[in-house]
Structure formats: C-alpha cells, structure tokens
Amino acid sequence: MPGAGYYVVLSMLKVLSVALLGLMPVAAVAQDVDWDSLDEDQINEITGSITTDLYHEMGHALIDIMDLPVLGNEEDAADIMSVFLINSLWEDEWAQQVMRASLATWAAIADSRGEGEPNWWDVHGPDKKRIATMACLFYGASPDTRGDFAADLAIPEDRAGSCPEEYAQIEESWGGFFQQLVDAGAGETMVWEEPKEETPLTDAMKEEVDYFNSILTLPSELVVRVAPCGQANAFYDSSDQSVTICSESAQQVIDRL
C-alpha cells in the first residue's frame, strides 16, 4: 500500500495542535488544486495526511454501524480508532509516514491560527492533548521500531514508558470487534461513490475502499466519497451511513508544503 513521503514534524510545539478534520472546520479554499504541478512526494504527502482523516471518520462509522460501546467522548474514541486502524493495516514504514504527514498538516494549521484558550465546552477535547495521546498510542503500538518517531515528536520519557500499555488496552478493547469484520472475509460493503472529477486524492481514497473490501465485510453498507464542501473537512453522516472527505482538504495540505 503506498504511503506519504517522509517529512519530519516541524517541532513539538506545532505538532500538538489541531484536531482531526471534522472537529474544527477550516474556511473554504477558493482555488482548485493544480495536481499536474505537484511532484510525487507532494501528492503522497497530501494523500497520506488525508488518509488519517478518512480513518478517523471510519472510527465514527464503525461505532455507529456496529453499535460499539463508547465510554467517554466519541470523538476521542474515533481518534483512537484511527490510530488502531493505521497500525493494524499498514506496514510500519508507511504507517509512520502517514502519521508524520498528518501531524505536520495539523501543526501548520495550529501555527496559522495561533494559541488560544481551549473551548472547554466543546464536545472535542483540547487539541494538543488529543494529538499527544494519538502520538503516544502510535508509538506504544510498536516501541521497538518507533523510537525515532517518539524522539522526533519529543514524547517525554516518562510518558513514553506508559505508551505501550496504553496501546495494549486499546487493542484489547477494539481488536475483538475489528477481528469480527476480518473473520467475515472480503466483501463489497464499503461503497465508493464515483466523483465528478478524478484526482490523485480520489484515486487514493478509492484505493483505501478497495483495500478494506479485500480484507473485511461490514454489517451494512458504508458509502465513501470525495466531494467539495466549501471548507477543508471530513465527516461521517449517520443518516445515510456515509463518509465524506472534502476535496478542499488537499489545498490545506499544500499550503503548508
């Protein structure tokens, strides 16, 4: 499975930043992406970053479709599911590159917005805390191979020591439910909605859908699409069981390259 190009996260102060798309939408991006002007590394960086957003929304979808128990905030649970899916489905090299690409994008967004007082009444937890948790869990899933990842993100040594146990708890909680889908075998329950225009982003998201269908079957159909939304975002709609990746998200990544 292809992954994003390797880009080191800018700094820890920037890394622990904005939450996944769908949490804090970004204003609309007026210009269309000139995909022909981008090189392979740039395209991989864009698709790798947005893949994590897809997996976050997949977390919401699985919670809804499988009626999974969630103790606490569902947004936090979807964050955790995205880390679990990336770690479980991607080879380590690609998994690390996807996580780095995503964190670099969120870092740039946070840097452009500046620091502010968290909205403690928001359904989402403080952004810095959420992404710190995701980084810890991802490192904890394979500490023997992700030492550089932890060092680059400056995960404190005392926290890093607890990350493997934290991930083990997640695997125990989510692993059995995910295994049910895998045990059901390959299927066609993830439905790709053909876009009005094919781009490297739509190709990458379709590849994700095809890959999921090759290894698992959901209890019911889930539609996945890439479409313009007027803003950089991604969301799960339980009314029609669909995940939408907003095409404007590509420009958001380009803006920080």
Image (cartoon, rainbow, N blue to C red):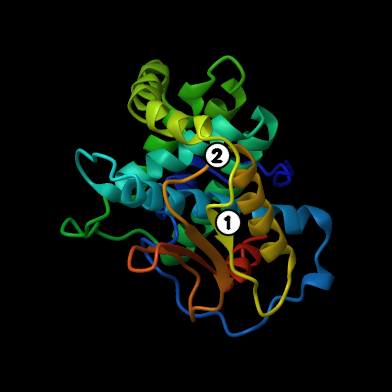
Quadrant of the image for the N terminus? top right
Determine whether the residue tagged by mark 1 lies in a helix, strand or loop.
Answer: helix
Q: CA distance from mark 1 to mark 2?
A: 22 Å
What's the residue at 41%, 40% (across, down)?
81
Q: Are marks 1 and 2 in contact (CB under 8 Å)?
A: no
Seen in the picture, residue 115 relative to 178 is either above or below; the reply is below
x%, y% of residue 245? 53, 65
Q: Marks 1 and 2: which is nearer the front?
A: 2
Is residue 122 found left or right of 176 in the rendered image?
Answer: left
For marks 1 and 2 on the same chain, the one whose residue lies earlier in the sequence: 1
Are there few (<14), some (14-19), or many (20+) residues within 10 Å of tag 2? many
Determine whether the residue tagged by mark 2 lies in a helix, strand or loop.
Answer: loop
x%, y% of residue 242? 45, 64
x%, y% of residue 121? 16, 59
- Quarter of the image for residue 226 reads bottom right
Image mark for residue 216? 2
Q: Nearer the viewer, residue 171 or 163?
A: 171
Q: Nearer the viewer, residue 58 or 95?
A: 58
x%, y% of residue 14? 48, 49
Q: Amino acid at mark 1?
A: Ile
Quadrant of the image for the C terminus? bottom right
Are there few (<14), some (14-19), or many (20+) residues within 10 Å of tag 1? many
Q: Amino acid at mark 2?
A: Leu
The total number of labels drawn is: 2
Q: Is residue 223 visible?
A: yes
Q: Is residue 153 visible?
A: no
Is residue 236 found left or right of 74 in the rendered image?
Answer: right
Seen in the picture, residue 251 relative to 45 is either above or below; the reply is below
Circle 1 residue: 50
What's the residue at 67%, 81% (across, down)?
32
What's the residue at 39%, 19% (across, down)?
168
Q: Nearer the viewer, residue 163 or 186?
A: 186
